[in-house]
Amino acid sequence: MAGVSRLTRFGNDLYTGAKSFDFVGRRKWWYGIAIVLLLIAVLVPVLRGHVSFGIEFTGGSQFKVSAVADSSQRLAEDAVHGVVPGAAAHVTVVGTDVKSIQVQTQTLDTEQANAIRDALAAAYDVPVEQVSVTTISGSWGQDVSRQGIIALIVFVVLAALFMAIYFRTWKMSLAAIVSLVHDLVITIGVYAVFDFEITPSAVIGFLTILGYSLYDTVVVFDKVRENTLEDGNESVRTFPESVNLAVNQTLVRSINTGVVAVLPVASILWIGAIWLGAGTLRDIALALFIGIIVGTYSTIFIAAPLYSQLREGEPRIRKHTERVLALRAKAKQEPVGAAVE
């Protein structure tokens, strides 16, 4: 109970301004961290020369050997190379108690696919009926890629219009979109760094985390708008201070929302990847897990500080800041003048 009481008091202090973290004033630090992460996310796939896309995007043949006693990946590689020498075979083990072997190759003709199917059945000592074969054409994969890109563009455009109309300023919209791009690039970068495969399920996860990040950003920006509208002609806070106060006031809520969202996603990721071996669950949950963490960071450390920076150069904002600072300086001098008299 004492811990809960301290946490409640801490949240109240952040809301009233009794305690404050300088998110806006130290924005160069946050920008620097973001730039480093973005560079890693971009340079790793460039230097490596590829990003791992599923056969749904690239086209190819996929084999699944169900209920194997020996889960050695080498058996699958040897079986593929025995039929098509030099063929690239991406082999993964799926499941825990009852394991399956999944093998992906380039697009094969019917004769090659049947030969590899027989070779896999012999290698793992299972009936041929336990080896399934799926072939996806390259043209279908290109169509999936095109639809994914279109969906992403439509989402970003609609999000930008919504933010601009709702908050009546394109600068909030720009800051939010920069934050969303940051989330997307870093999430895809994590996939590239660890060579995770990008599948249609992962793309659905990417679009979902953009929605989550946008929602979190809207909540913070709504508080920013409330604080800055309250400023008016009163001279208690400068514009950056009002923005920073809004971030502090919503900090506990943002963290709580992130934690509450991550915990069930982590459970789904664990169950999908370890227990069930369900590829679709794993792919969606992995994208969500990474994206929620990155999205929570960008809302607090990127979106709000960037919006403040975009507005600080406006004549009205500069004039308000000068008035606040002048009155503060005058207030400091008044006791001295009274003492001299």
Image (cartoon, grey):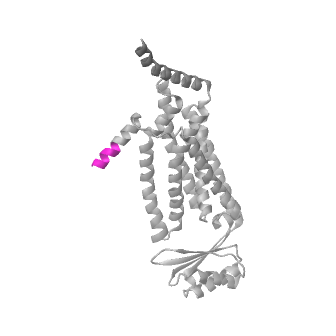
Q: Is residue 206 visible?
A: yes
Q: Is residue 81 above or below residue 318?
A: below
How far across and down, in percent of the image, does residue 144 sit?
65, 59
**Which residue sits furthest left?**
1
Quarter holding the C terminus?
top left
Seen from this angle, which residue lies furthest top? Answer: 341
Foreground pick, 122 / 197: 197
Q: Quadrant of residue 157?
A: top right
Q: Residue furthest front?
A: 340
Left or right: where does residue 1 sit relative to residue 41?
left
Residue 214 visible? The answer is: no
Q: Which x, y percent locates residue 229?
A: 49, 27
How many callouts does the rendering have?
0
Instruction: Classify residue 295 as left or right of residue 107.
Output: left
Front-most of 153 and 321?
321
- Residue 107 position by quadrant: bottom right
Principal SS element in the magenta part?
helix
Q: Residue at x 55, y 23 (%)?
A: 320
Q: Where's residue 64, x and y in %?
A: 57, 76
Is the residue 44 above or below the residue 242 in the image? below
Q: Is residue 109 above or below residue 211?
A: below
- 328 or 224, which lies in front? 328
* Stretch in magenta: 1-8
Where residue 192 sits, quadrant-wise, is bottom right
Q: Residue at x 36, y 38 (%)?
A: 12
Q: Could you say where residue 128 lies in the image, as x and y percent from the top left?
A: 58, 84
* The stretch drawn in magenta includes residue 173: no
